Structures are given as structure tokens and as C-alpha cells.
Amino acid sequence: MELIACIKLPAVIANLQEFLKTASSVALSRGFSAERISEIELVIEEVFVNIANYAYEGGQGDVEMLIKADEAGNLHVEFIDEGVPFDSTSVAEPDLEADVEERNIGGLGIFFMKQLMADVCYSREADKNSLKFTVVPSA
């Protein structure tokens, strides 16, 4: 796999746009459709905002995003942070059949990530969280 992009900045909401621009630029240069780029942006925003809001428990830290490409044209995205351990892949899927008033708050972003991206996986190594997913050109 070829490393296409790497960005590492403080995990603050003000830096979200840099992560979105990086991912969008890579996807556009690789021929992804506008619809697919919007889906990528949705997932990137969800992951980044969760890290910025929850990973550092009121403190500050960095978040890094790596984007690699394989021979098949897929993108492999990895988010790395040194925040508290959190395996987003283990979160139960929301009950989409329940009335809006009865649904638990949260969980939809993670649900969308699992629906829109392939091979979503989490690991914790050397005090770092790693969330990886694969983006195929068409869902």
C-alpha cells in the first residue's frame, strides 16, 4: 500500500476542516464520485468529532489521520490518538425502529460508519487508539 496523506493536528473542532479537506482532496484525485466523497466526509467528521470531544477527557492531545491506497483503488484510512481507550466498533447498533423520542442519544455516526465503510476495526497498542476503515470507490 502507498501512503497518500498524513495529517496530525491537535484534536480540537477548529481543525476538523483540515481533515475533511485532506480526505476529500485524496478521494477526488483518485476518481471517487461526489456522492462517495460526501459519505467519506460524514464518516471523517464523526470520527474526528468523537476524538475531539471525548478522547482526552478535558485535556488536549493530537489526532493523526493516515490515508493509504491499494492497487484495487481502495483507500485505507486510519485515525490514531493517545486518548482514553474506546472501541467504537463494539457500540451496539441503534434501534432504528424505535420512535425518535425513545431512542438513545448517540450511536448513529458509528452506525453510518459501519454501513458506509468496509473493514472497520479498532485496536489499542502502545497507549494509542487506532481506528481503521476501508473506503471502496462505490458503496
Image (spheres, rainbow, N blue to C red):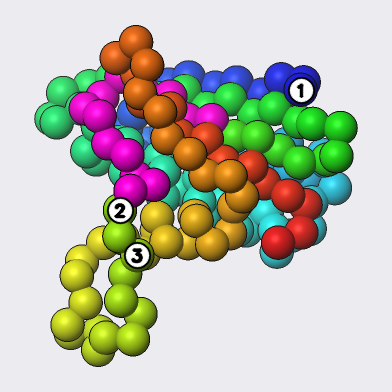
Closer to us: 2 or 57: 2
Task: Give me the residue at 70% from left, 27% from top.
Answer: 68
Residue reaching furthest to the top: 126
The answer to whether residue 116 is left or right of residue 88 is: right
**Pointer 1 with pointer 3, Cβ within 8 A:** no
Question: Marks 1/2: CA distance?
Answer: 29 Å
Tell me if residue 4 comes above or below residue 89 in the rendering: above
**Image quadrant for the N terminus?**
top right
Q: Secondary structure at mark 2?
A: loop
**Percent coordinates x, y for residue 7 in the rendering:** 54, 22
Residue placed most toward the observer, 85 or 61: 85
Residue behind mark 2: 91
| Image quadrant assignment for residue 93 | bottom left
- Inspect the magenta stretch and tell me whether residue 14 lies in it: no
Mark 1 or mark 2, which has the lower sequence index?
1
Contact between marks 3 and 2 (CB within 8 A): the answer is yes
Q: Position of residue 131 (x, y in %)?
A: 45, 34
Q: Would you say residue 3 is visible in this rendering? A: yes
The amino acid sitting under disc 2 is Val
In the image: residue 13, left or right of residue 100:
right
Q: For this rendering, which residue is in front, 136 or 10?
A: 136
Label for residue 93?
Answer: 3
Disc 3 marks a residue whose amino acid type is Glu
- The magenta span reads 78-90
Which x, y percent locates residue 115? 54, 62
Q: Which label was assigned to residue 1?
A: 1
- Magenta segment includes 86: yes
Q: CA distance from mark 3 to mark 2?
A: 6 Å
Pointer 1 and pointer 2: residues touching (CB < 8 Å)? no
